[in-house]
Amino acid sequence: MNSLALINEFLGQPPNASEHGYQIDHILEFAHWFMAALFVGWSAFFIFVLIRFRKSRHPKADHHGVRSAISTHLEFSCVLIEAVLLLGFAIPLWAKRVNEFPPTGDAILVHVVGQQFNWTFHMPGPDGQFGRREIGLVSNSNPLGIDPNDPSGKDDIVVLGELHVPVNRPVVIELSSKDVIHNFDLPHMRIAADAIPGSLIPMWFKPIKTGSYEVVCGQLCGLGHYGMKGMVVVDSPQDYQQWLKERAELAGQQSAPAATQRPPGEPPVGPTPGTVPPPGGPKQQAPAKPEQAPAQPAQSPSGE
Ligand SMILES: [Cu+2]
């Protein structure tokens, strides 16, 4: 990392752990330095103007204003630099990210489902086939509603909160949501995308460093938004195979393909009181509505 790149670190950016991340970091680095230069430039100009046009020296307003063309040139240069950043770097990089997905044979495919307030990861298991999902089958023990009668779902791996992936292999994520709009944000991998109910959003990254990386929700999605975190663990290929084996065994042991275990201290799966239940989700027992306002204690007839 060169010393100019320290501005990203100074502004709180975590170290990059993905293959394409350095390209994003370069754009951010340039944009940050450009903004710093503008901030210093405009601030200095503002202070200069305050002193230069103070009331004691200019008791009368000058209605002609600036006659030199220097401000026009300066503003045009700023627009030009911004246009180059956007059209020359940001948009081509974005187009590459959304148009050039890795070949499916090489990539790990994971379904990621957001809900208030956690992330569930669904992998196809040894057979490579995802089990059928049905919203009506969603329950606390089967958070994704995997059909227990579908043979391809028997070995599926469903994990809450923590996903393992191997290093140096592309990971393709298909993102969806069970309730409101969330945002699957992996800051270390320099990727983020909205999880939108009713849509399947593809995204991908290639991890280049082993370690544990935090997943956060990047959209204000309700009362528990602050705690909607997860973890992506980038393993060596051996560790990843070991994890897959353990998970597959766990999935095989259970009759229903819901290998989900809630880490201690995590809120229970399902709608949280005070939030909107997922549309089309399992019908909740509606609390019995009082017919009327709570009956007032009968007033004793006066005189008794
Ligand atoms: Cu969220």
Image (spheres, rainbow, N blue to C red):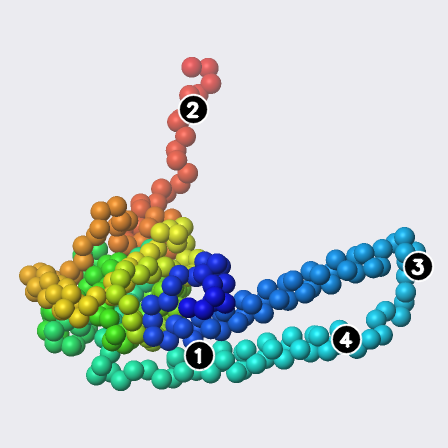
Q: Earlier in the sequence, mark 2 or mark 1?
A: 1
Earlier in the chain: of badge 3 and badge 2, it is 3
Circle 2 sits in a helix, a strand or a loop, which is it? loop
Q: Which mark is residue 164?
A: none
> For numbered disc 4, what is the local secondary structure?
helix
Separation of residues labelled 2 and 1 (CA atoms): 72 Å
Q: Which residue occupies 31% across, 45% down?
A: 288
Counting residues from the N terminus, which is met first, the one under dot 3 or under dot 4?
Answer: 3
Residue that carries the numbered disc 1 in the rendered image: 94
x and y, in percent, of residue 279 in the image: 34, 62
- Residue positioned 18% across, 58% down in the render: 260
Determine whether the beta carbon of the residue marked 3 sits less than 8 angstroms from the nearest atom of ligand 1: no
Going from N to C along the chain, the mark reached first, 3 or 1, is 3
Q: Amino acid at mark 3?
A: Lys
Residue highlighted by disc 2? 299
Nearer the observer: mark 2 or 1; the answer is: 1
Farthest residue in the front direction?
3
Which residue, given by chain and number where applicable, does mark 3 sit on?
Answer: 60
Front position among marks 2 and 4: 4
The N terminus lies in which quarter of the figure?
bottom left
Quadrant of the rendered structure where residue 34 is? bottom right
First in sequence: mark 2 vs mark 4: 4
Three-letter residue code for mark 1? Trp
